[in-house]
Image (cartoon, rainbow, N blue to C red):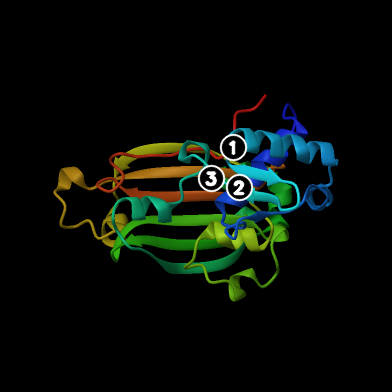
């Protein structure tokens, strides 16, 4: 977390936790509880809470503790695929294509680089791979292939988890939250396999286009949370919207 103040790092974590729905009942933890959870002083928690209170996101009252007052601005958070589909007036759903355990040397080089795995380390580093098809009104819109470091999650993750639900909800169950993301996007023609999977055959040839996205998501401690490769239908994402959770670095 070089170059980032402790209170700011805690604020990023709190924003991610709020976005994940962890505090949907409205009540946030006390300063002592959060200080113990994050391993920081109460003054650091107080600074983070001060910032959120100034922006009208939380409210603190003597005797009733800290409660949610408002929602995080969309510009300050990662917009989930579920939210994007709903914003388009469609009902989101997910089809799990495959889940598997892989070794680091079995994935593409950019994935290894994202996890900062040397060729030697990759051979002995297990990863979880979750391959999903995200749909709106049962129409396939995007294929997401997500890679996770197995050591950061429980051993039975692939067997015990319902990956049709929000992936951020899955992370929250492991006390992991997205703080920021880096992403590259490339527009290109769809392959034959992509046209079939995303059901684009009825589109004119000139519109059988996709956005290929490579994203690295970090938690508040600057650890890589997930590495994702996504193939998105151009006709759904022609007005692409993407935001980063958290404020800028100091």
What's the CA distance linking mark 3 and mark 2?
Answer: 14 Å
Q: Do the residues labelled 2 and 1 touch (CB within 8 Å)?
A: yes
Q: Which of marks 3 and 2 is in front?
A: 3
Q: Quadrant of the C terminus?
A: top right
Q: Which of 8 and 223 is in front in this view?
A: 8
Residue identifier under label 1: 246
Please identify the residue farthest to the front as the structure is shown.
63
Q: What percent of the width, then of the height, locates residue 70? A: 53, 45
Instruction: Categorize mark 2 by other alpha carbons within 10 Å: few (<14), some (14-19), many (20+).
Output: many
- Give the quarter of the figure containing the N terminus: top right
Q: Mark 3 points at which residue?
A: 70
Relative to 3, does residue 188 appear above or below in the rendering?
Answer: below
Label whose residue precedes the other's in the sequence (1 or 3): 3
Horizontal and vertical percent position of residue 92 = 36, 62
**In the rendered image, which residue does mark 2 sit on?**
16
In screen coordinates, is 16 left or right of 133? right
Q: What element carries label 2?
A: helix
Disc 1 and disc 3 in contact, CB within 8 angstroms: no
Residue 240 visible at all: yes
- Mark 1–mark 3 Cα distance, whole angstroms, equals 16 Å
> What x and y, as percent, mark residue 187?
33, 38
Q: Is mark 3 on a helix, strand or loop?
A: loop
Residue 2, image x and y in percent?
75, 30
Name the image quarter holding residue 219: top right
Q: Earlier in the sequence, mark 2 or mark 1?
A: 2
Residue at 30 percent across and 39 percent down: it is 239
How many numbered circles are shown? 3
For image coordinates 77% across by 51% down, the residue present is 30
């Amino acid at each position: 977390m070089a170059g980032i103040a402790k209170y700011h790092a805690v604020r990023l974590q709190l924003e991610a936790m709020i976005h994940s729905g962890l505090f949907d009942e409205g009540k946030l933890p006390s300063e002592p509880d959060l200080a113990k959870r994050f391993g920081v002083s109460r003054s650091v928690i107080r600074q983070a809470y001060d910032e959120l209170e100034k922006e009208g996101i939380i409210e603190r009252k003597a005797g009733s503790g800290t409660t949610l007052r408002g929602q995080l601005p969309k510009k300050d958070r990662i917009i989930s695929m579920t939210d994007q589909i709903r914003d388009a007036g469609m009902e989101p759903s997910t089809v799990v294509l495959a889940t598997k355990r892989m070794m680091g040397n079995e994935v593409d080089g950019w994935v290894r680089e994202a996890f900062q795995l040397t060729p030697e380390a990759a051979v002995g580093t297990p990863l979880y791979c979750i391959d999903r098809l995200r749909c709106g009104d049962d129409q396939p819109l995007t294929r997401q292939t997500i890679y996770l470091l197995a050591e950061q999650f429980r051993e039975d993750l692939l067997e015990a988890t319902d990956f049709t639900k929000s992936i951020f909800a899955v992370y929250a169950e492991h006390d992991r939250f997205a703080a920021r993301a880096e992403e590259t996007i490339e527009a290109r023609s769809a392959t034959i396999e992509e046209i079939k999977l995303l059901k684009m055959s009825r589109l004119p040839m000139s519109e059988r286009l996709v956005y290929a996205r490579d994203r690295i998501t970090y938690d508040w401690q600057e650890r890589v949370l997930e590495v994702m490769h996504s193939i998105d239908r151009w006709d759904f994402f022609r007005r692409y919207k993407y935001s980063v959770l958290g404020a800028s670095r100091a």
